[in-house]
Image (cartoon, rainbow, N blue to C red):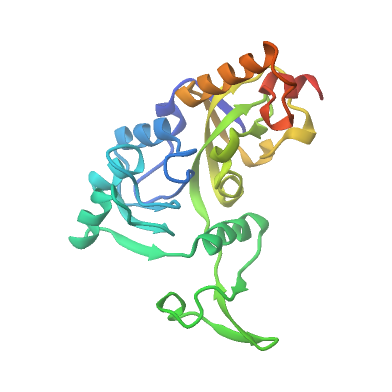
Amino acid sequence: MLEFVDSAAQAVSRITDGATVLIGGFGNAGQPMELIDALMDSGATGLTVVNNNAGQADAGLALLIKERRVAKIICSFPRQSDSWHFDEAYRAGEIELELVPQGNLAERMRAAGAGIGGFFSPTGYGTQLAEGKEVREIDGRHYVLESPIRGDFALIKAYAADPAGNLVYRKTARNFGPVMATAAAHTIVQVDEVLDEPLNPEHVVTPGIYVDTVVGIPTESGVKEREERAALAAGQPKPCLATKTAAELAAEK
C-alpha cells in the first residue's frame, strides 16, 4: 500500500541487513542522497547495491562503501578519478564487484520488472563478462544469456509525486529511476514536490503502481528547477512540455 512519510529515516526503516538495494543515479545526477544518508544512519549492512557507478568522492553511495556497509556492488562503471573508497575496499578484498555493461544493466532490471526470465544479448560475448554464462548462436551471431536483476528495495529520486504516487522526473535525473522502480519489491522515492492534484496521465513517467513509499525532500536542484520555470513564466517564450512545472502538468489533466 502506498504511503507518504515525513522523513527519510522513516522511508528506509524497512531495509534490513543483507538486502539487495537498487539505487538510482548516473554519477550524482538523480542520486537520492538524502535516502542514502538515512540508510547509512539506519545501520543496515551486508548490502548488495545496484548502481551505474561505485560512488564518487565523499557523498552518497561512496560513504556507504567507505563504512563497509556494501558487501557487493553490481555496476557498469566502478572506477573513476574520485572513486577512492571503492578502490580501497576492492583492493582490500572487502567488497565484491559484478561488472555489467551499462545497456545490459538497464535491460536486466527492465526484464525483472516485466517478468521476463532472461534474455540473450551480444554484448560481452567472447570476453570475461560471458564466462560461466550460456551462449547461443542465433542467425549467425553469438549471444550471451543474461538474467534479471531484482531488488528487495529501490531508492530513487523524482521531481514530483501526485497523490497516487505517479512520478515525473527532472531532465537527466530520470536515468535509471523508471526501470529500478519496476524491478524492486519495495520502491522508495524522494521527491522535491508532493502534489495535491493528480498528474495528467499523459505526463506520468513512473506509474504509482510501482511506488510504495514517498517522502518529500526539497533539494537544491528542485529549487533551481522552480527558479528556471518562474523566469520562463516572467516573459520568456512559452516552455515546452519538458519544462512545465509539475503543477502545470497536473492542471492539464
Q: Residue 112 vs residue 101: left or right?
A: right
Q: Residue furthest front?
A: 236
The picture places residue 47, in percent across and down from the top left corner, at 35, 50
Q: What residue is rendered at 49% in x and 75% in y?
A: 124
Quadrant in which the N terminus appears: top right
Q: What residue is rendered at 54% in x and 64% in y?
A: 104
Q: Residue 75 vs residue 231: left or right?
A: left
Q: Residue furthest left?
A: 92
Q: What residue is rendered at 20% in x and 54% in y?
A: 88
The front one of 136 and 38 is 136
Q: Residue 189 vs residue 120: left or right?
A: left
Quadrant in which the C terminus appears: top right
The picture places residue 2, in percent across and down from the top left corner, at 61, 31
The count of marks equals 0
Q: What residue is rendered at 45% in x and 35% in y?
A: 32
Q: Residue furthest right?
A: 253
The picture places residue 11, in percent across and down from the top left corner, at 46, 31
Above or below for 75 versus 4 = below
Q: Residue 8 vs residue 4: left or right?
A: left
The picture places residue 133, in percent across and down from the top left corner, at 49, 79
Please tell me in which quadrant of the rendered image residue 146 appears. bottom right
